[in-house]
Image (tube, rainbow, N blue to C red):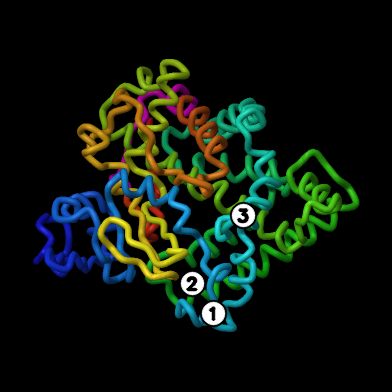
Amino acid sequence: MPLDFPSLPAEATLNPATRRVSLNAKSPAFFQNPYPALEAIRAQTPVFFWEQSGLWCFVNADDVNALFRDRRFGREILHVATREEVGIPEPEARLKPFYDVDGLSMLEREPPVHTRLRTLVNRAFVSRQIEKLRPRIERLSHELIDKFEGRGEAELIAQYSTPIPVIVIAELLGVPAERADDLLDWSHKMVAMYQFGRTREQEDAAVAATLAFSEFLRGHITERRGKPADDLISTLIAAEEAGDKLTEDELVTACILLLNAGHEATVHATGNGVKAILQSGLDPKALFADADKTAATVEECLRFDPPLHFFSRYALQDLDYGGISFRKGGKVGLVIAAANRDPARFVNADRFDPARPLRANVSFGGGIHFCIGAPLARLEMQVSMPILFERLPGLRLTTDPLYREAFPFHGLEALRVAW
């Protein structure tokens, strides 16, 4: 039967008997506002087979939260099975440079490798270390606003929400911030590999970006070996040389992951959050009146319109969950966007309401793969957003912002404002 809401193309369908959904994530009607579609599906079933992804997907908060933490599911499968066992073909030779790097990422590994990699990197991301960055984020926020305040208008994605996390993560790692344009270009091209329906052109661009990014980092690592500094790359080099089992390939991949993940989500969490505030009609002064209200506003931004809408896991064994039988090597889809608007967990879930009782959302995932950069992302938003609204009273949208076609990522193409 057609999904019953007017904003989605007529070809979107759900079969209640089989719980199979046909839904094109590249349809503008969906990626511009996926929430009505997900609610229409939830009204029929809390779990559905998404034909275009080939996965059984869960939309309710309790299920998504539980699946993030269920150790019977994981981010990799080839540590417990062969490709032949689970029907995973070898990647095409032309894509090997990308997968050679991606396969070493802590995001794609399970214990004990994940534990080793995360323990080495985590020392830089504990809250007490991240809090030391607050003055730098404050200065950077003011410096960026100084550049456009007098013009009376700005495009905030490029001029504000992007530079802050890119520069901060580059400085934290010890990578030259003046290479920010290159870092962004490489990152965007690599991250496109995770989009639904990627193209051959995107794949080729991702491979080229991987090679360029890796070459740049190897050169910088070589430089740091001879001239250590107070940065994460130097710390990880010291750990490697002390015998903590971090290879140079793993070091390169860790840096790429942190640079990619360290800005991509925060850029769009900030942009989506500013948009939500401006469209809500709520008073920014009240939303950011003190530290507690600021923290609550940021959490509501993350819940209401998160920058990542979907994540997947492999079944590490034959199992049943939620009435669905998974074979070892099968994959499950966790629909973050739907879980964050589950009416069973959040009252008036489709309303932006920073005053709502605080309940955990799943924007940063959960379990052992909970986002290592969550403290940094929260701090960047808690510092940069109040400064933006304080410095630019009367901030307003000048155009209706549009989202990029990049599912499962969810971020604005541009955020044009005036004051």
Chain-order first, disc 3 or disc 2: 3
Q: Does the magenta stretch include residue 390?
A: yes
From the viewer's perspective, is 186 left or right of 220?
left
Looking at the rendered structure, the secondary structure element under dot 3 is helix
User: Magenta stretch?
Assistant: 387-401
Q: Residue furthest right?
A: 226
Looking at the rendered structure, the secondary structure element under dot 1 is loop
**Disc sitting over residue 114 in the figure:** 3
Residue 58, above or below 209: above
Kindly identify the residue that appears in the image at 45 percent across and 22 percent down: 390
Q: Which of 29 and 122 is in front in this view?
A: 122
Return the residue at label 1: 91
Amino acid beneath label 2: Gln
Spatial CA distance of label 2 from label 1 is 15 Å
Return the residue at label 2: 202
Residue 149's x, y, as percent? 49, 31
Which tag is nearer the camera, tag 2 or tag 1? 1
